[in-house]
Amino acid sequence: MTQKKHTRAALLNSGAELVGLLAASSVTGGSSLSGYGTTAFSNNYSLITLNRIVLTYLYSGNGLFQTAVQLPIQDALARRIVIESAQMSPEDVDQILDWLEDHDSWQHLEDAKSWERVYGGGGLAINTDQDPEKPLNLRRMKGAPIEFYDFDRWQVSAKSSNFDEFLGYDDMTKADLLYYQGQPIHTSRIIFMTGKRAPSYIRRQLRGWGMSEGERMLRDLNNYLKTQDVLYEILDESKIDIYKIKGLANKLLTAGGTNAIAARIKAANEVKSYINALVLDAEEEYEQKTLTFAGLADVMRENRIGIASALRIPMTKLFGTSASGLNATGEGDADNYNEMVQSEIQAKMRPQIKQMIELACANLWGYVPEFRFKFPPLKALPALEAEQIKASEINRICMLYDRGLITDGQAIGDELAKGETISADLAAKFQARPLPPGGAQSVDPVKENKGIEVFKAARDAVKNALNGRKDAPR
C-alpha cells in the first residue's frame, strides 16, 4: 500500500514538472499575451533567399509571385524618364532616349530589377571593347560597341571573399574583380542592384546582397496556396458514391471476387449515368454524400488581404478585383500603390538609371554633361483636367509677365516647359532679351521679341480650345 502511494506521488511530481517545463517553454513573460513564444514559433529561421532552386521554380510556376515581383517594376518604367539639362538641347535629350531604346536598356533594367526582387540581388554587366579586367574608362567609350547583360546574384562569384572588419561580413559587391559566368570582370563594369537590406545578425549570410521579396510574403503565400489546395481536394471529393455490399470482405477473398465487384459497381455507374436510375439487389445499399463550401470564400479573401498587405500592393491591382466599400472608385488604392512604387522601386532605381545615362552620353559624345532626370507622374490626368491645369499655368505666367516679374521669352519658355505645359522643342524657340531701362512697361510692342509672340499664341490657343468645349468651365 505504501509503495503504491510513493509511486502515485512520483507520477504526480513528474506530471507537475512536465507541465511546468511546457509552460516555461511557451510563456516568456508574465502572461501568454506578454510572451514571445508564439511569435518565435511562427518565425522562419531558414532564409528562403538562400534557396535558389525554390525561388527559381516559385517565380517560374507561380503567377501570383511573378506578378508581385514584376508589376511594380513595369509600372515604374512604363512612362520612362524625363531628362533635364542646361548643357543639352532637346535634340540631345532625344538622342539619349533613342540610345537607351536601341540598346534595349529598359528591358535589361527591368529583368535585372526582377532578379533583385526574386533572389535579393542582381545587376547589369557592361560589355565593351576594353579589357574587362581593368576599370571602365568612359573617355574611351565614344562610338564603341556596348551591350548589357542582366544577371542574378548567383551568376557572379569571387575567388576570395572581401571581409569587412567593421561590418563583419563578406561583401562580394565591394571586391575589385568578380567572375561573371567564369569570365573575370572588373566591378566598375557592373551596375549592382541589391534587395531589401537585412538586419546585421543575418547580413553576413547574404554576402553583401539583400533579401528576396519572398521573405516577407512567405507566410501569407503559404496560407493562400494551402487554401487553394484544400479547395481543390474538396472539389474532388464534393460528391462521393457509397455502395454497401453484403459480404464484401468475404467476396474479395474468393477467386475472381475483386473483378466481379468492380464490374458490378461499374455497371451500376453506367446505368445511373445513362438512364438516371440505379438498380440494386434487395440486400445492397446505395448512399451519396455531398460536401459544402461554406466559409471558404471568406478564408480566400482573408488570405488575399494578407498577401496584399505584405506586398503593399492593393487587391485591385494584384488580383484584378473591383474596388469595394467606401473606396468604390479605387482612387485610394491607386494612390497608395503609386506611393509604394515611387518609394520602393523608382527611388532605389535612380542610381542605376543615372549610370546608364552616363554610359549613353559617353558612348555618343565621349563626355558626360551635367543632367538631371525625373520620372513622369504615375497617375494620368483626364484630358479636360490636364487642359485646365495648363490654362491655369499660362494665366499665372501671364500675370507674372504683366507685372514685370518675368521679362524675357527664355524665362517664360523655361517656366512653361518645367511644368510640362509646352514641349521642350517649343520652349527652345523662346528667345531671351535683357530688361529695358524703363522696365517691362517701356517695351515697344512692335519690337517685342519673338518668344513673347509665341507665348501669347500658345495662351490664346489654349483659351480658345477651352472655350470651344461644351463641358469646359466658364
Image (spheres, grey):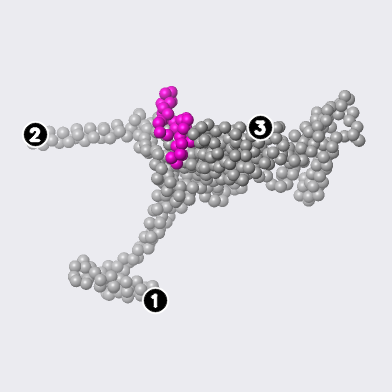
The residue at the point 79 percent across, 46 percent down is 466
The residue at the point 40 percent across, 31 percent down is 160
Q: Nearer the viewer, mark 3 or mark 1?
A: 3
**Which secondary structure lies at badge 2?**
helix
**Most prominent secondary structure in the magenta stretch?**
loop
Seen from the viewer's position, the closer of residues 162 and 69 is: 162
The residue at the point 61 percent across, 32 percent down is 139
Tell me the crowding category of disc 2: few under 14, some 14 to 19, or many 20 or more residues within 10 angstroms, Cα based.
Answer: few
Q: Which of marks 1 and 2 is in front?
A: 1
In primary-sequence order, the first of circles 1 and 2 is 2
Query: Which label is found at residue 369?
Result: 3
| Image quarter hosting the C terminus | top right
- Asked if one can make out residue 22 in the rendered structure from this viewpoint, the answer is yes
| Mark 2 lies on residue | 2
Question: In the rendered view, does 334 fall on the left or right side of 199?
Answer: right
Query: Which label is found at residue 275?
Result: 1
Seen from the viewer's position, the closer of residues 74 and 248 is: 74
In primary-sequence order, the first of circles 2 and 3 is 2
Tell me the crowding category of disc 3: few under 14, some 14 to 19, or many 20 or more residues within 10 angstroms, Cα based.
Answer: some
| Magenta span includes 303 | no
| Image quarter hosting the N terminus | top left
In primary-sequence order, the first of circles 3 and 1 is 1
Query: Three-letter amino acid code at disc 2?
Result: Thr
| Magenta span includes 180 | yes
Question: In the rendered view, does 354 fall on the left or right side of 224?
Answer: right
